[in-house]
Structures are given as C-alpha cells and as structure tokens.
Image: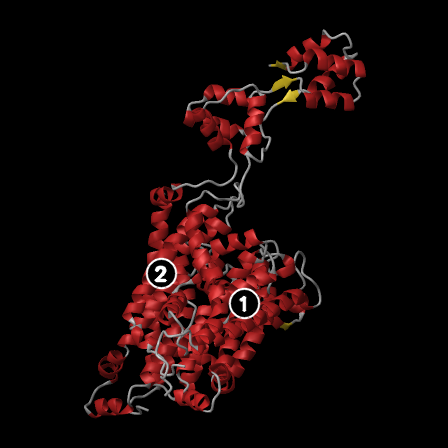
C-alpha cells in the first residue's frame, strides 16, 4: 500500500533471518529419501531405506500402523467430545439467561488463560486411582477436558457474532429456544464449528505430554510418543529414520493446514502454545 | 413482549435449557480441573512417592525404620527387641512340624512340654528339644525342626494396626502410648501428611536456581521473540507486497503447526555433533560438538530460539491483524507530512498496537511460565540442570527421574506454586482486559 518505500531491503533482511527455518524444513524432506556422506551437506544418492519402518516393525517398538491408528482414534475422539460440549456450552453462555452466567463465563476465561499442564501430576494420580491409566479412554477424556475451556471460549465468541434478529424471528414464529439453536443458530456458526474441529484434531494429533505421562504403553502409544521414544533410544541413532517417521507423522498436519488455512487463522489468533 | 415474564418468578425455559446445555461441560470441568487443582494442594501436603504407593500402606518393621526409632524417638531398647529374632514354640510351628513329617509322639510332646515357650537363640531351643523323649534323630532333622519356630516380625507386612500390635504383643513386648505412636510413625509404609515438602522447597539451593532459570526463560523468550520479533515480523511484512508477505507468514507459522516432537528433532539435527552446524563449521576450523548441550550458554540460546520461533507466530498474527485495521489514510497522511519509514512505525503503527502488545505479553508470560514441553524434548533441563525451569522440575520430580523413586508429593508441591501463580495472574489479566463488556445480559428473556 505504501509504495513510497522500497520493499526489497525488507524482503532481504527478513529472508536472512528466515534461512535457518527454511533449511530445517527443506532438509527434513530431502534427508528422508537420500543419503549424505559424512561431513557433507549435499546428498549423493537416492534411497528408500529410511522408510523401512513402513514394512517392518522396528525392534522394541509397536507397529507404526498401530501407533497411527491410536493417534487417529485419540485425535478424532477428542475432537468429537470438544465439539459436542463446546457448541452447547458456548451457546448457553453466549445467549441464554443461565443462573450464574457471569460466574461460568469468568470460570471459562480463567481456565482458558490457565495453563493446564500444571495439573498433570494430579491427573496422573487420579487416573491411577480410577484405573484409566495406560488406556486411550483415559487420555482422551483428559485431553478433551483440557481443550474445553478454549473451545467454549471460541464458540462463545462466534455465537456472539450471530445477529439476535435471527433468534427473535424464530421465537416470534413460535419455535422454542432449543429449536432456534438447532435449526437457526447452529447453521450460522457451522464454519466456526469446522474450524474448531480441525484445530482440535491437529492439537490431538500433535499432543505429546499427556499420552507420554498417561498412556505410555506400546499398545496405546501414539505417534508423538513413538517418535520421541525412537529418538531417545541412544543405541539406535539414525537421524534419517527419525526424520522419515517425522514426515510420516507430520504430512496429515500439513495437508490439513494447506486445505483449511483460512479457517484455522481465525483460531490460531487465540493460540494455546507458548 | 419478549420481556413479558419478570425475572426470578419461575425457572424459565431458557434457564433450564441453559443449565442442560452447560451440564456436560460442567462435569468435565469439575472432574479434570477443579478436582486436579484441589488434589494438587492435597498431594502437596503428603510424602507420596513410588515407595509409599498411592492407595495406602501397611506396617512393616524395617532396618531403616528401627534406626529412626532409636535415633529420633530414643527407643533403642524397643528397636533392638523388635529387630531380634526369636524362637517360639507356638501353634503354627507345631502344626508345621506335623506337616513336615515329625512323628505324632514328638508333636504331642512339643505341644505338652514346650508350647508357649520362647527362646532367645536357636541353640537354646535346640537344647530344649534335645531333652525331649521323642527328640528327632540326627542334626539335620533337629535343624529343620528348630527352623520352623523361628519368629521375627522384621520385613513382615501387616495390613492393619491391630494385626501389627497383636504380632508385637506376640513377641512379648509391652508398649506404652508414646511407644505405640513412635512405632506407628516408623513402621508405616504408606504415605502420610507432612509439611516438609515446603520447608524442603525453601531450603534447597536447587530451588533458587530453578526459580532464576524460570525468570530468565520467561523474560528472554517473551521480550526477544514473543513480542519483539513478532513486532518485527508483522511490521516488516506490512511493508511488503502481498505475495512475499504471505510466504513469510506461512514459513513462520510452520513451527506452530509442527508437532513439538518433530519440531525439536529439526533443531537437534541442526545442533547435533554430526549435524548441520558442525558440518558447515568444521571446514572453517571449529571443532565438531553438540552445539545445544555443549555448555549452559549455548543450551539457553537454543531453548530461547526453540520456544521463541514458536511463540513469535502468535504475536505476528495478532499484530498483523491490528496493523491491517489501522485506516490507510493515516499512512498516506504521514507520508504527505514527510515521515520516513521509522517515523511511520514509531508514530502511526506502534501507538495502535499498545493493547495487542499488552495482551500478548500477559497471555504468553503465563503460557511460558508453565510450558516445559520443548525444554523436555530439547535438553531435558541439561546440561547439569542449567535449563531446568520450574514446570520441568515439577514434572521431573513427580513423573520422570533417573533415581526411579517418583516423588509425587514434592512434585505436587512444586506444581502447586505454579497453579497459584497461574490463577492469580489470570485473574489479574481478566481485570485488565475488561470483563464486564463480555457479559452483557441477553436481550431475549423467555
């Protein structure tokens, strides 16, 4: 817009700062299909051996497909719970004359700002008490619960933007508040529900600490824990293998991001990472 | 007409519906937020650990327990008496003897003449047995018989207090009230209530260091990247044509959308001793080494970079949106007045970003304070605890350490400090960012 100023010095300066990031991500993909001689930075041959984890199970690890299925179940179940509960609770807080409404809203806001990772020790002990330690169900419930304040907060914000006239009209025509919500308001916030769904799925897919602490067993292991265990094993150091597993793990994320970039931006602005 | 029904007359439809819609969220929040917060406080007042278990314990006389009984409670004699091995001819022993194949005559004679007697050593018992008419033939038979009467409560677990005291009474030891209390304290294997976690936290030099680490970590990352570099990113991309600006923003979002495990792997690849940095620096005369874990300074640089590259993107998104909402006419007007680019940034853009900057600072200080995921993956607090921050210390103490004894109680005490700071800060931020405007009463009352 401000064409009085030249833009190339800016592009150059930022380009220099951005180089490490670009290098890391370019080499992430390059190293998975090539071999590089020690001491060199240029690959000298193509190879498929780094992807061997796809057709053989690595020693001491669960099958990659078991881990992938676990991750998928974990992310999907978390998303469904978050969507179901935040789309209802968000509406109640945004639009209905609930007793203690201000109290609920303040609670959600505090919890939204409150970093949940501090609770992990108590949650670990609770799951041990009730016998859900090392189960997918346990870690799904916990992850969903920790995402909820954020989900409710986002949904409340989107419900706030729906014009009251829509609900007024529905009620004039004799519909109940429940019907108005289901038939008139929910379709209005469908894009937000989609965005929240994609966000929750990606958050579940990337989650590391919760499954690490609450469900570390081989049978219920998710990809993040699988990859971290692979890297932590000092006896089998193979950077190219780690990167290949990493690419396998991150590709769904990148695809979803490319498809839904616009939707996600509305949510990342309220980000949850440090 | 929509406001026809006055407030508070009957529970109205929208209220019931609202409560129904809120109920599931409420249950989840109570189970996984309120309960953990309360329990963190409760656990912080216990000495719970892997050794004590989490459900409860038993009573067991152990060597260390007896040492404590003698030293802390001054009950040397009692400790010796409890630790001593005795030989008692009792029902259990006699039954065992008959099962082991002792003759009926011997069994009945044992029952008749020695039942109830206690001996301080095996030799005394054996001497008594030898005097019996039906004594076993041969030393081996005698040894195996006397072994059946060996009685000691050392390392035996008693599930309840009563069972334990019965066993002690069975040894012929009389206890007064203070001795009973001292004995319970030194033999209970389960967790107990204690305030020691906090006194320990305040006295350990380690705590001070962790505290300072946390301060460095939060402020360095926050100032350099989460607000500083985020501002640079948003202002610089603002002065670019749309295409390169979009590309730069997308690249800087990569760290945020990448799963943490993978993202930190990329940094390890950069810093590893056979990694990228070494490969390009070795030909220039540097030694090959692990650049991340080589020394504390390097470790800190990497920790701040790793967290900062992720943190910068949130500020970038919010600041960019704020800059976009500045009326274009302001930029034109400043240019007509001859402002250079720096003056435009200083007097047009920055004043408009005051609130977003404040928001990012508040929000991210809280996230940084409690985040330890990236540090755990990158350095695990190393080298030598140099990058151990408070949240990581709590995690390592309670859930993952090399010693193997996980101290849930002490870890919870460390976490409790974070919980309190978190709640206080988030309440303070709520006041700052005007809560009332968000809860305007709904215009439909039904």
Residue A227 sits in which quadrant?
Answer: bottom right
Q: Secondary structure at mark 2?
A: helix
Q: Chain of mark 1?
A: A
- In the image, residue B171 lies at what x, y percent? 58, 20
One can see residue A210 in this view = yes
- In the image, residue B48 lies at what x, y percent? 48, 44
Residue B82 versus residue A22 in the image, above or below = above
Q: Residue at x 53, y 83 (%)?
A: A259
**Residue that sits furthest to the front in the current view:** B9
Q: Choose between A17 and B24: the one closer to the eye.
A: B24
- In the image, residue A16 lies at what x, y percent? 40, 76
Residue B134 versus residue B45 in the image, above or below = above
- How many neighbours does mark 2 have within 10 angstroms: few (below 14), some (14-19), or many (20 or more)? some
Residue A31 versus residue B56 in the image, above or below = below
Q: Which mark's residue is nearer the viewer, 1 or 2?
A: 2
Q: CA distance from mark 1 to mark 2?
A: 51 Å
Residue bearing the label numbered 1: A40
Q: Residue at x 52, y 41 (%)?
A: B52
Residue bearing the label numbered 2: B423
């Amino acid at each position: 817009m401000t064409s009085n100023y030249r833009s190339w010095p800016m592009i150059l300066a930022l380009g220099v700062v951005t180089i490490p990031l670009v290098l890391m991500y370019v080499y992430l993909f390059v190293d998975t299909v090539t071999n590089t001689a020690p001491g060199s930075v240029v690959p000298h041959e193509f190879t498929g051996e780094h992807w061997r984890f796809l057709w053989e199970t690595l020693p001491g690890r669960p099958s990659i497909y078991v881990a992938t299925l676990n991750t998928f179940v974990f992310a999907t179940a978390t998303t469904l719970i978050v969507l179901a509960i935040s789309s209802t609770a968000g509406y109640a807080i945004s639009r209905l004359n609930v007793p203690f409404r201000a109290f609920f809203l303040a609670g959600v806001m505090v919890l939204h700002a409150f970093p949940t990772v501090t609770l992990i020790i108590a949650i670990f002990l609770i799951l041990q008490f009730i016998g859900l330690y090392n189960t997918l169900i346990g870690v799904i419930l916990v992850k969903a619960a920790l995402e909820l304040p954020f989900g409710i907060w986002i949904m409340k914000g989107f419900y706030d933007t729906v014009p009251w006239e829509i609900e007024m009209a529905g009620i004039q025509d004799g519909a109940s508040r429940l019907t108005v919500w289901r038939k008139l308001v929910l379709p209005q916030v469908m894009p937000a529900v989609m965005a929240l769904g994609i966000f929750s799925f990606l958050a579940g897919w990337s989650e590391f600490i919760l499954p690490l602490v609450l469900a570390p067993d081989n049978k219920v292991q998710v990809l993040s824990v699988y990859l971290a265990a692979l890297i932590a094993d000092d006896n089998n150091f193979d950077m190219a293998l780690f990167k290949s597993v990493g690419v396998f793990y991150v590709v769904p994320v990148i695809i979803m991001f490319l498809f839904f970039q616009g939707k996600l931006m509305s949510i990342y602005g309220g980000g949850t990472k440090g | 007409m929509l406001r026809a029904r006055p407030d508070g007359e009957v529970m109205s439809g929208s209220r019931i519906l609202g409560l129904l819609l809120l109920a599931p969220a409420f249950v989840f929040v109570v189970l996984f937020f309120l309960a953990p917060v309360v329990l963190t406080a409760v656990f912080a007042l216990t000495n719970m650990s892997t050794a004590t278990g989490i459900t409860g314990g038993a009573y067991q006389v152990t060597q260390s327990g007896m040492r404590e009984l003698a030293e802390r409670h001054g009950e040397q004699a009692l400790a010796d008496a409890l630790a001593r091995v005795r030989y008692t001819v009792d029902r259990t022993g006699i039954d065992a003897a008959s099962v082991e194949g002792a003759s009926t005559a011997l069994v009945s004679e044992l029952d008749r003449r020695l039942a109830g007697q206690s001996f301080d050593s095996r030799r005394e018992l054996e001497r008594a047995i030898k005097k019996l008419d039906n004594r076993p033939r041969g030393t081996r038979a005698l040894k195996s018989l006397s072994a059946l009467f060996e009685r000691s409560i050392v390392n035996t677990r008693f599930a309840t207090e009563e069972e334990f005291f019965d066993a002690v009474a069975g040894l012929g030891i009389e206890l007064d009230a203070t001795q009973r209390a001292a004995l319970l304290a030194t033999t209970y294997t389960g967790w107990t209530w204690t305030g020691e976690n906090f006194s320990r936290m305040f006295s350990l030099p380690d705590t001070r260091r962790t505290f300072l680490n946390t301060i460095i970590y939060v402020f360095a990352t926050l100032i350099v990247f989460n607000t500083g570099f985020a501002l640079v990113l948003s202002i610089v991309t603002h002065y670019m044509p749309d295409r390169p600006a979009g590309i730069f923003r997308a690249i800087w979002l990569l760290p945020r959308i990448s799963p943490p495990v993978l993202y930190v792997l990329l940094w390890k690849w950069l810093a590893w001793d056979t990694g990228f940095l070494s490969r390009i620096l070795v030909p220039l005369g540097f030694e090959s080494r692990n650049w991340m874990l080589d020394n504390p300074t390097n470790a800190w640089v990497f920790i701040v970079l790793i967290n900062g590259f992720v943190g910068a993107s949130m500020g970038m998104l919010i600041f960019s949106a704020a800059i976009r909402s500045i009326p274009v006419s302001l930029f034109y007007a400043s240019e007509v007045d001859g402002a250079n680019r720096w003056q435009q940034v200083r007097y047009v853009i920055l004043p408009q970003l005051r609130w977003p900057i404040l928001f990012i600072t508040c929000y991210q200080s809280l996230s940084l304070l409690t985040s330890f995921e990236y540090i755990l993956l990158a350095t695990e607090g190393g080298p030598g605890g140099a990058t151990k921050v408070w949240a990581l210390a709590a995690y390592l103490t309670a859930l993952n350490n090399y010693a193997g004894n996980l101290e849930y109680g002490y870890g919870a005490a460390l976490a409790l400090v974070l919980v309190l700071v978190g709640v206080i800060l988030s309440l303070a931020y709520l006041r700052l960012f005007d809560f009332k405007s968000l809860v305007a009463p709904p215009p439909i009352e039904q």
